[in-house]
């Protein structure tokens, strides 16, 4: 599978609004989120990915393409799970559509993401979301050849493992 990671212009906003519903529904298994009375899951910060303020906050929206077809999306920001000011990049959301899973699409998109944004990364997963933990440990482990740290965050804002590494030291 040919995988590409494309920075998304404002014209692509509807794609994110639509795929976000699929993502939030899937994640509700772990987050416990309920849809509103219209049946929609809320995601308050999406529009900020296309504002100057959002840019200043390190927000970047990206589409994952597989064989030139829409296969998922990534939202990158700088929100530290640990409240660490030195953190430069965080995976806010990461989604691969079901038909493309377990074919290395997520892996290739993530490796490209780390290369494209050099610096100190944090990636966190919900405490009970074991598949995401397995995925990120495998991919970050590959990128860093095992040279990453993992901490357990237990705060009002987050509960689960967080991987820490510097993507400038790719091996
Ligand atoms: C997690 C997710 C992004 C993985 O994407 P993917 O394209 O299927 O992952 P890959 O095929 O690149 O997997 C790479 C490796 O990660 C691990 N992995 C991936 N999915 C896994 C799963 N469901 N269970 C256990 N390990 C998994 C495996 O080691 C895998 O290598 P292998 O297939 O050779 O065993 C995808 O399942 C997804 O979008 N899930 C819903 C949203 C989500 O949970 N996002 C993460 C939020 S933190």
Image (tube, rainbow, N blue to C red):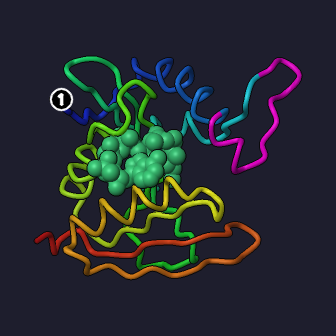
The relative height of residue 113 versus residue 41 in the rendered view (above or below) is below
Q: Position of residue 126 (x, y in %)?
A: 62, 60
Q: Camera-side residue: 135 or 42?
A: 135
Q: Position of residue 143 (x, y in %)?
A: 21, 65
The relative height of residue 5 versus residue 162 in the rendered view (above or below) is above
Q: Quadrant of the C terminus?
A: bottom left
- The answer to whether one can see residue 120 in this image is yes
Which residue reaches farthest left?
171
The relative height of residue 157 versus residue 95 in the rendered view (above or below) is below
Which residue is drawn at the image coordinates 52% and 25% (left, top)?
Answer: 19
Which residue is drawn at the image coordinates 72% and 34% (left, top)?
Answer: 42
Which residue reaches farthest right?
37
Residue 91 part of the magenta segment: no
Which residue is drawn at the image coordinates 46% and 20% (left, top)?
Answer: 15
117 vs 149, left or right, is: left
Which residue reaches farthest front?
102
Quarter of the image holding residue 99? top left
Give, as a single range, the part of the protein colored magenta: 26-39
- State the residue position of label 1: 1
Q: Camera-side residue: 59 or 138?
A: 138
Q: Position of residue 80 (x, y in %)?
A: 52, 69
75 vs 25, left or right, is: left
Quarter of the image holding residue 38? top right
Q: Position of residue 168 (x, y in %)?
A: 17, 71
131 vs 126, left or right, is: left
Q: Quadrant of the N terminus?
A: top left
- The answer to whether one can see residue 76 in this image is no
Residue 36 part of the magenta segment: yes
Q: Could you say whether the residue bearing mark 1 is in a helix, strand or loop?
A: loop
- Residue neighbourhood size for the residue with mark 1, other residues' Cα within 10 Å, grouped as few (<14), some (14–19), many (≥20): few
How many numbered marks appear? 1
Which residue is drawn at the image coordinates 32% and 73% (left, top)?
Answer: 120
């Amino acid at each position: 599978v040919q995988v590409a990671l494309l920075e998304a212009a404002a014209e692509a906003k509807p794609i994110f609004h639509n795929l976000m519903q699929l993502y939030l529904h899937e994640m509700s298994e772990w987050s416990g989120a309920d849809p509103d009375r219209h049946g929609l899951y809320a995601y308050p910060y999406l529009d900020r990915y296309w504002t100057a303020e959002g840019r200043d906050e390190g927000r970047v929206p990206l589409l994952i393409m597989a064989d030139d077809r829409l296969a998922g999306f990534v939202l990158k920001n700088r929100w530290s799970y640990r409240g660490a000011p030195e953190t430069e990049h965080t995976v806010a959301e990461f989604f691969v559509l079901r038909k493309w899973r377990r074919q290395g699409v997520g892996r290739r998109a993530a490796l490209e993401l780390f290369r494209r944004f050099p610096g100190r990364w944090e990636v966190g997963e919900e405490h009970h979301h074991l598949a995401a933990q397995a995925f990120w440990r495998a991919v970050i482990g590959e990128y860093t050849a095992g040279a990453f740290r993992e901490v357990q965050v237990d705060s009002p804002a987050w509960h689960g493992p967080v991987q820490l590494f510097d993507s400038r030291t790719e091996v």
